[in-house]
Image (spheres, rainbow, N blue to C red):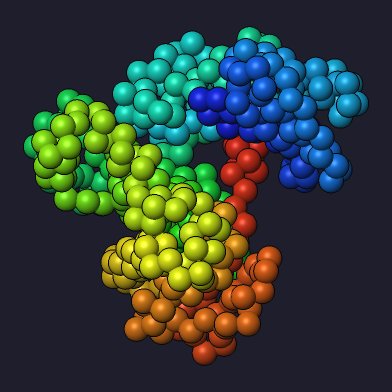
Amino acid sequence: MKIMAINAGSSSLKFQLLQMPSENVITSGVFERIGSEDAVFTVKVNGDKTERILPIKNHNEAVELLLEGLIEKKIIKTLEEIDGVGHRVVQGGEVFKEAAVLDKVTIAAIESLSSLAPLHNPPNLIGIKAFKKVLPNVLQLAIFDTTFHQTMEEDAFLYATPYEWYEKHGVRKYGFHGTSHQYVSEEAIKLLNKDETKVIVCHIGNGVSITAVKNGKSVDTSMGMTPLEGVPMGTRTGNIDPAILEFIAEKEDLTLTEVTNILNKQSGYLGVSGVSNDSRDIAKAAAEGNKRAFLAMQVQAKRIADYIGSYYVRLGGLDAIAFTAGIGENSGEVRKMILDYIKVLGVELDEKLNNTRGVTGNIATKNSKVKVFVIPTDEEVMLAREVYNKL
């Protein structure tokens, strides 16, 4: 059985075709700069990577190119071999407690939630509509970033704003990176091999979120109503005093929209360091003596440690911390900075393992009271699993 996993952005479309239930990746790739004359179509098959630069007007064209390419490269013989498609959708609000079969009603419901995720849901919908047009008779599912966090209780997801804001406008914490947190926490539970588990997942990439997971259920997470809340990220501020928005708007003669855009796109690593939003550039600059670059790393590490500490209390103890995503999986330096802040919890890092490139599994010492896992995330597998379970 072949299932396609799709993650559509405003000018991009990532894909994987998986053989299920073995979960083997048949092919994967990405379309970048959709809408331009020099769009890039990259595809990997059997370890071989090919790249084409060509005009791609829109997501419909990208989907058609993708499906034609699968046949041209003899990855599949006909489109009928695709048994299902799983689409990542960022915001499901309180409407979607689980994955949903895509039809006119669910698509309209996802559109109605676009005000909660204006940067994410519209491009997700573009990808959905493009695939529905080309594969109208194939089972297609929306899998939401927010679903995994629907198990949070009110004291975790409500803000101390007027309650009517929640009732009328849905103002509350939703959390994101749900498919990643679910996958990694499930893998961590397998490694722990025990019935009752307390795990904190640190998804650290250009976007960062921390989630407390008790017995496989999300009980709290760092991102909020939008992905702007939480710890500092590549370009996002994370938590700040909300009064700063009005203060800076007046001082810099900016609109609220302009200030919010700066908090989303010009802050975090980029804003503090003045160097880059890329952790590799930040680490290089810090090693060369750039104090602001080092400070950007410190600020992020300290805030992540703050969340780990509070979630340790929330969970009533801790079995494991699991690091994932680009930085979490690959930067021993960032992992060490974070864990140095929480030594009081009895975490002892094996320095040699931590500095081993490509390391996975437990990187804590035998004496550590808390295990430290490095687990590569696989959101596409989670999408495919959801579709497979519906077939």
Q: On the image, which quarter does residue 23 sit in?
A: top right
Q: Quadrant of the N terminus?
A: top right
Q: Which residue occupies 62% across, 12% down?
A: 57
Residue in the foreground of this view, choosing between 205 and 261: 261
Residue 264 visible: yes
Q: Position of residue 271 (x, y in %)?
A: 35, 50
Q: Would residue 20 appear left or right of 189 to someone viewing this image? A: right
Task: Name the one closer to the observer, 352 or 128.
Answer: 352
If the image is split into quadrants, where does the C terminus sit? top right
The answer to whether 88 is drawn above or below residue 380 in the figure is above
* x and y percentages locating residue 273 in the rendered image: 39, 57
Residue at the spot 57% in from the left edge and 87% down from the top edge = 366
Which of these two is toward me, 322 or 140?
322
- Residue 372 in percent (x, y) is at 52, 73
Q: Position of residue 153 (x, y in %)?
A: 27, 49
Taking the spot 51% from the left edge, 70% from the top edge, the residue there is 287
Look at 68% across and 65% down and name the residue there: 358
| Front residue of this view, candidates 275 and 138 | 275
| Depicted 129 relative to depicted 380: above or below | above
Instruction: Tell me, yes or no, if residue 223 can be seen here.
Output: no
The total of numbered circles placed on residues is 0
Instruction: Residue lying at the far bottom in this picture: please name it.
Output: 367
Residue 217 in the image: above or below residue 145: below
* Residue 225 lies in quadrant: top left
Please give left or right for residue 388 compared with residue 96 in the image: right
